[in-house]
């Protein structure tokens, strides 16, 4: 019965924001909001009390037998990257709902159980990630956030207001973490280790974290046919050098687990016959060692300034976000291992390279992440896929963990 229910949930969620190729549920857009309403409806059908906080996080709760016992929580996110897949985030939400449903069927637990669906997980809309989980932890940056805009020019407060959420009420989202016992997140691996090793579960011990930059290059827009090559101040030429600088700096520390990416670039005026005058690009550098990531960022900044000087353009570099790697709860890692052993689930320990909401939650609350395989290690693309068999084994491991925590 669980399997059919899980299959139904993925089919229903997949119908929301489905494109000819891939899925689009950007944070707070119509598809994201429709999916959230669907999840709230299903949580109520399960018998959970359901609420949405001021930033759009969903909290579904079932009370325990001991008054004031701390909460045992699990969950993830439902928003996607543009033309992304249907399993990143959704596995953790559906998995948490299924696990809680199983536990409820056996009777009440000592501790209350909660399912969390985080708002604004992906950085695709505003250039920074984990909005909902940051608010739960109190890691708010109100002055910065109120001025950040999406690609259409809408700032965060306006986007929230369009969903009847008040930006000024965001501080009310912060939870008293002394009243939360633990948090667990089931997630696709987004890499090849489990599939290659024929393993069902990866117990994450540490989560790598990114430093993200916004780089704006300002040159001189000019006619492409009448402006001599030696007279040009081409913003895109300098930006191209910066892209290569990111690759060079990351490659120099690749043996230490550093990765670097330029995943977004906007060129203006954006016409074939105009020398580009302005370029903005976003840089993502991440690893397990904050000091090492910081040193790579400094190398990129140095090369960026040299590229700008060489082309005779100006460059402005701003830090969008700066996160520290997080070591997850040793106790929950051990209990996750026990859950896998008891159910004879093949597992391994691993570093998490993806940016999960757990890297925020884990700074305040004992947290663990359980990975399941995804086909070819591919994620954030239409080819993202996790089999129902792998999802159900992950839910088994999660259920065992939550039962240990809640009883």
Image: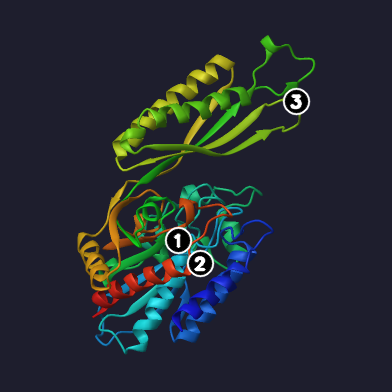
Marks 3 and 2 close (CB-CB < 8 Å): no
Q: Residue at x 72, y 33 (%)?
A: 270
Q: Secondary structure under badge 2?
A: loop
Q: Residue at x 62, y 26 (%)?
A: 236
* Distance between mark 3 and mark 2 Cα atoms: 42 Å
Q: Residue at x 48, y 52 (%)?
A: 376
Marks 2 and 1 close (CB-CB < 8 Å): yes
* Residue 313 placement (x, y as % from top left): 59, 20
119 vs 283: above or below: below
Q: Quadrant of residue 249?
A: top left
Marks 3 and 1 close (CB-CB < 8 Å): no
Of the image marks 3 and 2, the number of the one nearer the N terminus: 2
Q: Nearer the viewer, mark 3 or mark 1?
A: 3
Quadrant location of the C terminus in the rendered image: bottom left
- The label shown at residue 274 is 3
Reading the image, the residue beneath label 2 is 56
Q: Residue at x 28, y 78 (%)?
A: 403
- Mark 1 residue crowding within 10 angstroms, few (<14) / some (14–19) / many (20+): many
* Residue 176 placement (x, y as % from top left): 31, 68
Q: Quadrant of residue 290?
A: top left
Q: Is residue 138 visible?
A: yes
226 vs 330: above or below: above
62 vs 77: above or below: below
Q: Nearer the viewer, residue 227 or 249?
A: 249
């Amino acid at each position: 019965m669980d399997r059919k229910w899980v299959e139904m949930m993925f089919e229903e969620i997949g119908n929301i924001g489905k494109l000819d190729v891939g899925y689009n549920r950007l944070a707070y857009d119509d598809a994201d909001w429709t999916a959230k309403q669907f999840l709230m409806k299903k949580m109520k059908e399960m018998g959970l009390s359901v609420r949405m906080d001021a930033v759009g996080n969903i909290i579904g709760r079932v009370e325990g037998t001991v008054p004031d016992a701390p909460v045992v929580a699990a969950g993830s996110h439902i928003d996607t990257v543009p033309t992304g897949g249907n399993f990143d985030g959704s596995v953790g939400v559906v998995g948490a709902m299924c696990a809680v449903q199983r536990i409820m069927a056996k009777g009440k637990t000592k501790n209350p159980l909660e399912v969390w669906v985080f708002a604004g997980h992906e950085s695709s809309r505003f250039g920074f990630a984990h909005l909902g989980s940051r608010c739960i932890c109190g890691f708010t940056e109100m002055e910065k956030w109120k001025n950040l805009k999406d690609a259409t020019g809408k700032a965060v407060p306006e986007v929230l207001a369009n969903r009847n959420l008040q930006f000024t009420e965001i501080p009310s989202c912060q939870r008293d973490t002394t009243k939360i016992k633990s948090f667990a997140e089931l997630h696709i691996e987004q890499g090849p280790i489990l599939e290659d090793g024929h393993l069902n579960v990866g117990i994450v011990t540490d989560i790598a974290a990114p430093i993200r930059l916004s780089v704006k290059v300002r040159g001189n827009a000019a006619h492409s046919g009448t402006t001599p090559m030696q007279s040009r101040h081409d913003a895109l030429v300098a930006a191209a050098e910066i892209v290569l600088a990111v690759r060079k700096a990351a490659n120099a520390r690749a043996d230490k687990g550093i990765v670097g990416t330029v995943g977004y670039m906007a060129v203006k005026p954006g016409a074939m016959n105009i020398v580009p005058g302005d370029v903005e690009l976003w840089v993502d550098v991440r690893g397990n060692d904050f000091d090492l990531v910081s040193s790579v960022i400094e190398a990129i900044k140095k090369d960026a300034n040299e590229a700008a000087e060489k082309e005779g353009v100006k460059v402005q570099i701003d830090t969008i976000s700066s996160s520290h790697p997080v070591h997850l709860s040793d106790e929950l890692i051990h209990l996750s291992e026990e859950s896998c052993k008891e159910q004879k689930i093949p597992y391994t320990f691993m570093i998490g390279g993806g940016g999960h909401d757990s890297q925020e939650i884990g700074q305040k609350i004992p947290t663990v992440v359980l990975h399941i395989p995804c086909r070819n290690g591919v994620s954030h693309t239409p080819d993202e896929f996790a089999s129902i068999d792998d999802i159900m084994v992950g839910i088994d491991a999660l259920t065992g963990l939550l039962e240990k925590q809640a009883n």
